[in-house]
Image (cartoon, grey):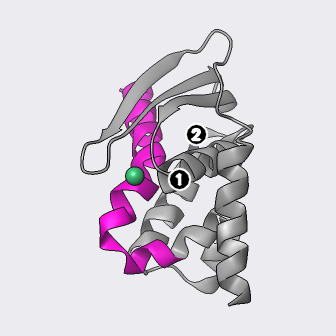
Amino acid sequence: MAERTFYNEILTDHNLHPQHKKKIENPDYVLEGVNPSCGDDIFLSLRLSGDTIVDVGFEGDGCAISQASADMMAELVMGKTIAEAEHYMDLFYRMIKNEASEEEIEELEEASVLQDISHMPARVKCAVLGWHTLEEMLNKHKA
Ligand code: ZN
């Protein structure tokens, strides 16, 4: 029960006070991510300096899970290298598929509260929306 409250508090906090739901200055990339099954629609912006993510923000609308997950993703990858961001993406996807270890889940910090999504197939697309959008963006950058 305590864990459930914790999960709700973190989700609510990221929805009411998102740190990264904003326009960023001079983005190198802006990409729309859409999840039609729920109606989530975000625009992710990214600024790089060499291999480092120096700023990341998102705008748009969607359910509480999609918005909180995008905000948590932004918080984790901010200031990290592309390789580190890809490491977090891999961990997050495996957590959602219920394939990550306890230690790996801990690395995801607040995003670890979304591990229960692995038991809610209908919400998986909401939870991964921000992460998939980032992945697509980084793949474009590397191409
Ligand atoms: Zn959603």
Q: At numbered mark 2, what does the secondary structure look like: helix, strand or loop?
A: helix
Number of numbered labels in the structure image? 2
Q: Nearer the viewer, mark 1 or mark 2?
A: 1
Could you say where residue 90 lies in the image, as x and y percent from the top left? 47, 60
**Residue range highlighted in magenta:** 116-143
Could you say where residue 63 lies in the image, as x and y percent from the top left? 46, 49
Q: Is mark 1 within 8 Å of ligand 1?
A: yes
Q: Is residue 14 magenta?
A: no
State whether residue 78 appears in this view: yes
Q: Where the N terminus falls, by quadrant?
A: bottom right
Q: At numbered mark 1, what does the secondary structure look like: helix, strand or loop?
A: helix
**In this rendering, would 91 be left or right of 105?**
left
Q: Residue at the spot x=43%, y=80% of the render?
A: 99
Is the residue marked by circle 1 packed among few (<14), some (14-19), or many (20+) residues within 10 Å?
A: some
* Frontmost residue, 112 versus 123: 123
Q: Residue at the spot x=62%, y=49% of the render?
A: 84
Q: Where 47 sits versus 116, above or below?
A: above
Could you say where residue 143 lies in the image, as x and y percent from the top left? 35, 26
- Mostly what secondary structure, the magenta segment? helix
**What residue did someone put label 1 on?**
64
Mark 1 and mark 2 lie on one chain; the one further toward the N terminus is 1
Name the residue type under label 1: Ala
Place residue 74 in its image quadrant: top right
Name the residue type under label 2: Ile
Q: Residue at the spot x=65%, y=40% of the render?
A: 81
Q: Where 142 sits versus 25, above or below?
A: below
* Frontmost residue, 39 versus 71: 39
* Frontmost residue, 60 versus 78: 60
**What residue did someone put label 2 on?**
82
**In this rendering, would 50 be left or right of 17?**
left
Could you say where residue 26 lies in the image, as x and y percent from the top left? 64, 9
